[in-house]
Image: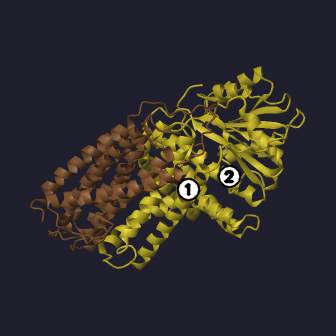
Chain colours: A yellow, B brown
Amino acid sequence: MLVLEGYVLLTVALGLALAARQLVLAWNVENSGPVHIEEGAGGFRTHDDWPTVTVLIPAHDEERVIAGCLEAMTALEYPRGKLSILVINDRSTDCTGVIAEGLAKSNPCVKVLHRAPTARAGKAAALGDGMALSASEVIVLFDADYLPPSGLLKELVRPFADPQVGATMGRVVPMNSDANLLTRLLDLERRAGYAVDQTGRALLRLVPQFGGTVGGIRRAALDSVGGWNVGHLAEDTDLTFRLVLGGWRVAYLNHARCHEEVPEDWASRFRQVRRWAYGHNQCLLDHLGAVLRSQRLDPAQKLDAALILTFYAFPVLALLGSFAVIPLLAFGGEHGLIGGGWSWAGPLLGLAVLGPHVQVMIAARADGQHHILRVLPLLFVSSCLSLLASAAGAALLLRDRLCGLSLGWDKTRRYRSA
Amino acid sequence: MVPNGFLTAAVLGAGYIGLLTSLFRWCAASKQSHVLALDCGGVERCAPCKARRFHMSLAVGLAVALFCLEASGFMFLARLIGFPATCPASWLPLYGCTLSLAHAQPGASTAAGLLLGCVMVLLIARRAMPGSAFYPLTLLLIGIISVGAAVDLVAGSSAPARPQLVLRLATGLQVTAAVAFVLGLMILRGWSLAAFIRAVTAHAAGAGVRALGVLSMLAVWPHLPPASAIALLIAFVLVPGIATALTSVAALSTSQQVVR
């Protein structure tokens, strides 16, 4: 009983810490001026100032969306002669390569790299091969379903005028939010994650995350931290922490927005979160010690980074905690912190639950779309899915670490055509 | 003492599930688009809010009043139905309340029945709703209840769980709802009369749904072994209770009178 009680208390403490972090970030965004963080203002005034850029688009079986994506890419505004676009046809078994080659013929700045079926699977491996073909100073990443507006590229590159900036990250906006209840709930989660959480971290100079898409990386920064880590499923989070530990800064740009597709069915969402949880927990195991020991990070950054790293471990602890609390409350009697203290634990947990909801409310207001909050009471439905998927991801990682296996890349399903 | 616990629980539980379903349907039925345009400024701040401190005090006062009203209303309803609750004179309405329910000495068979019920619901859910938004939630709730029933089967205990736990959980939900009400008003600037009335009405509706859920648990409580009772309380009242705590925010979002 004592062990169970200790475990539940630890979980409650971590849950409260995560909620407090969410509320602090929300409070900061709420009380800041207009949320338009100027990064790199004043730099790159003339044509010659802008760095050379390669846009990398890893594409695995993306025949439904690749044409529309490339059409948007070729319309990007950037100084002539300084932009190249590289489609990485990553072992596709459909017509992705053919479509990309067709578009490359009519546009000289588009190139296509075909990866052999025997090449190593995974986004990081594909990006590594793409990087080998590029000599640009800045690499910008987009997934194959993304439709960037023409001015986005300059927004993502502008912060590199600051030599401390190693990576930039824009805001991802779901384009299919109206498809069903799931997409609406995911829209709420995305808004909270970007408009409040990432923005708050940027405002407080904490650790904004590089998300692996709608973002740029300074070539020199990537090389200095050893390139892409092909063994990681969350290569973006892994890179974020290696950059930050290496003394680089990640700049988040809330105004640099790009449309993406979010999963429209629960099975796809489950697999997506499971993959994220797997990769994120890999990062937890690999980087937590280095983060806590780092001389470069101040205490606030260390705390923020540590809490980000535990983000996908917490659902597992919470799920087990909800099971552990059952015997504690049933047989624990009036004594003990959990059994006797339910009076404080209940309200505290209730307040912890409000953390993400407050972020969503502030994000909705900042976006001028209050009406989306009508679906807010149902946010717990998608949270339950994430809870189960995160637990599955953590279990798979545990299995793989014990048995020396590795989880394969699981592609997210696309829904639109072109 | 409740004369026929199962009947009362069935009536209250059916009402609770019916109202909860209606609430979920209403929340999911938003017709306005959620898609955010890429070129919208999104730079929207409350220009110097002169009366902000006053608004905050007002909202906090309202939340405390709503919480006290809800807790008192709940106790009144509980006594009306026949639950013998005794509460000390306190500013925190449900804190320290005790409840003595007659215990029906449920055996291992109740836990086994609950476990069997979980398996049946799982089989039905897998066939009927694999693509539904609520399928993962159903799986999670079934998992929690199954763990409770399994703990009872292993422990073999028939000593009752303390009914005070139900009241304390109800307090937790009520506090959460009151705080959500304040935060909704503060963040969405729902200071117009229309918005305020909507929020209070929705809060009252949420409180009604919560009360039904808690009362149905109290009715069935004496007939359940301890771990099963706790698991059912978490799955049936606590998890969906989060939705009822946010009804005021959902109602504020539909108000055209929200001041930016």
Measured Cα–Cα span from mark 1 to mark 2: 14 Å
In the depicted structure, whether residue A195 falls above or below residue A152? below
Mark 1 — residue? Answer: A22
Name the spot of residue B206 as percent of width and height, x first: 32, 48
Query: Which callout, 1 or 2, points to the residue nearer the camera?
Result: 2
Q: Name, please, the residue furthest toward the top.
A: A106
Q: Amino acid at mark 1?
A: Gln
Indicate the quadrant where residue A294 lies: bottom right
Name the spot of residue B124 as percent of width and height, x first: 28, 45
Sequence-first disc among 1 and 2: 1
Residue B124 is labelled as none
Q: Residues within 10 Å of mark 1 (few under 14, many from 20)?
A: many
**Is B175 on the left or on the right of B113, as rendered?**
right
Residue found at x 50% / y 47%: B187
Q: Is residue A405 visible?
A: no
Indicate the quadrant where residue B226 lies: bottom left
Chain to which mark 2 belongs: A
In the depicted structure, whether residue B229 falls above or below residue B125? below
Q: Is residue A245 visible?
A: yes
A56 or A332: nearer the eye? A332
Residue found at x 30% / y 43%: B21
Chain to which mark 1 belongs: A
Name the spot of residue B213 as percent of width and height, x first: 26, 54
Q: Name, please, the residue furthest toward the left.
A: B3
Name the spot of residue B30 as percent of width and height, x first: 41, 34
Residue found at x 67% / y 39%: A255
Report helix, strand or loop for mark 1: helix
**Is B216 on the left or on the right of A164, as rendered?**
left
Q: Amino acid at mark 2?
A: Leu
Report helix, strand or loop for mark 2: helix
In the depicted structure, whether residue B237 falls above or below residue A257? below
Mark 2 — residue? Answer: A203
